[in-house]
Image (spheres, helix red, strand yellow):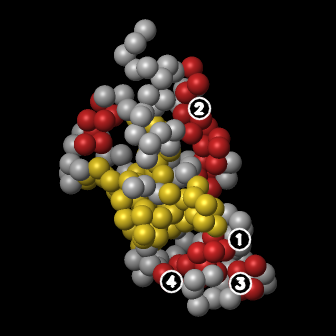
Amino acid sequence: MSENLTKQLLIAMPSMEDPNFSRTVTIICEHNQDGAMGIIINQPTNLFVDELLSNLDATSSDYKDPENSTHKSIDEYDPVYAGGPVQIDRGFILHDSDKQWESTLIIDNDLSLTTSEDILLAIAQGKGPENVLIALGYAGWGADQLEQEISANAWLTVPYEADIIFNTPIEQRWQSAAAKIGVDLHLISNQAGHA
């Protein structure tokens, strides 16, 4: 393993044909000698956050009007994202790192990934982290697989920027992430290797 890609944004090149990853941006949450895992941040599902939270022991009024909360309340119409093709029945919550939960992976001092239900209950009650992205499933790569795909020009890597994950409109994240390193993906041919 040459470079640790943890906390890098992985941008699918226009030539990416895998439907799971076409035109995606993925935040790499963990990268080591055994492989990598990440969450796709620009593939919304047809499920909305309010539907997901309604399955918890919190009432809808708890998260629609969190009067005593200093945290930003999540919009009930925010989508739940397709985080990747692995464990699609499991929830993964990307958030800024202001608190530890039962099952939290600290990616860096300003970004964490939590998989425990306690954070969803806190979000439902308006007591969750300020910035949140909820996904079902994750993207995974075996040992050296991601490095090989990057060498084959399947991906661009860009340093993490919270604004892209939490504030940029979903349909603009792919191009906006690439623009951070001066790349216009619309000018790159879909046919890799053909002049």
Q: Which residue is mark 4?
A: 118
Please tell me whether mark 4 sits on a helix, a strand or a loop: helix
Task: Assess whether mark 3 and mark 2 are in contact (beta carbons under 8 angstroms).
Answer: no
Q: Which residue is mark 2?
A: 179
**What amino acid is found at the position of numbered circle 4 in the picture?**
Asp
Name which residue lies at 42% across and 33% down: 16
Q: Which residue is mark 3?
A: 60
Q: Earlier in the sequence, mark 3 or mark 1?
A: 3
**What amino acid is found at the position of numbered circle 2 in the picture?**
Ala
Residue 193 appears at what percent x and percent y?
A: 37, 16
Q: Quadrant of residue 89?
A: bottom left
Task: Give me the disc on residue 76.
Answer: 1
Describe residue 62's horizontal placement relative to residue 92 as left or right: right
Describe residue 58's horizontal placement relative to residue 108 as left or right: right
Crowd around label 3: few <14 · some 14–19 · many ≥20 (10 Å): some
Crowd around label 2: few <14 · some 14–19 · many ≥20 (10 Å): few
Distance Cα–Cα, label 2 vs label 3? 39 Å
